[in-house]
């Protein structure tokens, strides 16, 4: 929560803040995010405008997760920019028609408000950070992942492989071996004939 009383309601008034706050829970997606309670550094610019307070800011935090290819833990710095308008509560609803009030009620569902001269940035921060996170983080761009046969991490052994024959080709492999054996027998028989002819 940020207090806007120092800012006042005079359009054009401006205040800058630099603060650190603990990360709320679930600040991330299934594979990467900001651990709950870890510091999130905020650089904020609050500007008073006619209808409310315009908040522009940058959030910096350390995110943790795991590589989607090799499942190794990873950690990196994240920087997310955001801008959001917080409107002043409207005290003149009673003088407007029902249709106008209904339209305003629908708009209010997506509108953030200054409440008791305070603004709550949690939802704005959550949207900014989550949208800045990679959906499929990798420990490095060329991570080869895991062996599909045994699960070994291929980055640790680039020459890792398995000599496995596809069972669909096993019958043909047996036929090929039979042909090779037959060729050897023919060659041996031909050698015997040649030897007899020489005698």
Image (tube, helix red, strand yellow):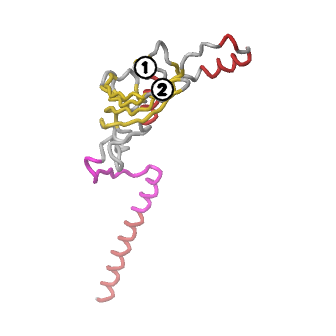
Quadrant location of the C terminus? bottom left
Q: State the residue in front, 55 or 178.
A: 55
Left or right, 97 with respect to 195, comes to right
Q: Position of residue 57 (x, y in %)?
A: 41, 32
- Report how far apart the C-alphas of labels 2 and 1 lie in the structure: 9 Å
Quadrant holding the N terminus: top left
Residue 99, position as x, y percentages in the image? 74, 17
Task: State how many labels appear.
Answer: 2
Q: Picture coordinates of residue 100 (x, y %)?
A: 71, 19
Residue at position x 30%, y 84% in the image: 195
Residue occupied by mark 1 = 4
Query: Would you say residue 172 sits in the magenta stretch?
Result: yes
Residue 197 visible, this orientation? yes
What residue occupies the far left of the structure in this picture?
Answer: 156
- Pointers 2 and 1 in contact (CB under 8 A)? yes
Q: Left or right: 111 with respect to 195?
A: right
58 or 77: nearer the eye? 58
Residue at 46%, 34% in the rendered image: 131
Residue named by callout 2: 48
Query: In front here: 23 or 8?
Result: 8
Q: Can residue 167 be found in the magenta stretch?
A: yes
Q: Secondary structure at mark 2?
A: strand
Which stretch did the figure color magenta? 155-177
């Amino acid at each position: 929560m940020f207090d806007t009383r120092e800012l006042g309601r005079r359009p054009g008034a401006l205040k800058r803040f630099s603060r650190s706050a603990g990360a709320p829970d679930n600040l991330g997606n299934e594979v990467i995010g900001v651990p709950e309670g870890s510091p999130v550094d905020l650089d904020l610019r609050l500007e008073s405008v006619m209808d409310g307070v315009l908040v522009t800011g940058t959030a910096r935090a350390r995110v943790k997760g795991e590589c989607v290819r090799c499942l190794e833990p990873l950690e990196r710095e994240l920087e997310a920019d955001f801008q959001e308008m917080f409107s002043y509560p409207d005290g003149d609803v009673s003088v407007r028609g029902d249709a106008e009030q209904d339209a305003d009620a629908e708009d209010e569902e997506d509108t953030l408000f200054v409440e008791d001269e305070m603004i709550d940035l949690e939802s704005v921060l959550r949207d900014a950070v989550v949208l800045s996170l990679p959906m499929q983080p990798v420990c490095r761009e060329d991570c080869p992942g895991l062996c599909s046969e045994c699960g070994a991490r291929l980055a640790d052994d680039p020459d890792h492989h398995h000599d496995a024959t596809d069972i669909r080709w096993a019958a043909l492999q047996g036929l090929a071996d039979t042909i090779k054996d037959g060729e050897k027998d023919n060659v041996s028989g031909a050698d015997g004939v040649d030897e007899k002819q020489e005698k």
